[in-house]
Image (tube, rainbow, N blue to C red):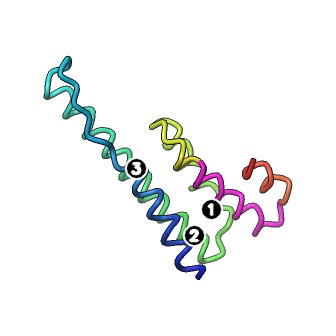
Amino acid sequence: MRHHLKCLTLATVALSLVPLSVCLPLYPAPLVAQAQTTQKQIAEQALQLYQKATEQFKQGQFQEALKTLKQVLAIMKELGLQKAQGTILNNIGLVYSNLGQYPQALESYE
């Protein structure tokens, strides 16, 4: 069941990172394509970092996982993806809990 939860969390983040196709007739097509490419690259970077944090967590490298998750959170904020931010904050709380830092864990969950 724990594996399913991890897969669900990863799927949530991955789906949150996928940029939606937006039709903006007021902007030139190359500009829109460039913006979408940049956003896609940022989303891919966030997904790679998230996967890195997952591996760090599995290996018991909680401080490293925390640092990596905070990087992912900053990207989610930059992209304005609130649902993904919630998922990452939940994971940050889990890391804090594993570190025995319960007040910080509770703060992440709020």
Amino acid tagged 3: Leu
Q: Which mark is residue 36?
A: none
Direction from residue 90 to residue 13 in the image, left or right: left
Disc with the residue nearer the chain's start (2 vs 1):
2
Residue 94 position within the rendered picture, expressed as x and y whole percent measured from the top left: 70, 64
Which amino acid type is marked by label 2? Gln
- Magenta-colored stretch includes residue 92: yes
Residue designated by label 3: 17
Comparing marks 3 and 1, which lies closer to the viewer?
A: 3
**Range of residues picked out in magenta:** 86-101
- How far apart are the alpha carbons under marks 3 and 1? 22 Å
Callout 2: SS: helix
Residue 98 vertical position relative to residue 89 in the rendered view, above or below: below
Residue under label 1: 64
Q: CA distance from mark 3 to mark 2?
A: 21 Å
* Between 68 and 4, the one nearer to me in the picture: 4
Q: Is there CB contact under 8 Å for labels 3 and 2?
A: no
- Name the magenta segment's main secondary structure: helix
55, above or below 106, in the image = below
Comes first in the chain, label 3 or label 2:
3
Disc 3 or 1, which lies upstream in sequence? Answer: 3
Q: How many marks?
A: 3
Residue 8, horizontal then vertical, whole percent: 50, 68
Left or right: 18, with 108 as reference point: left
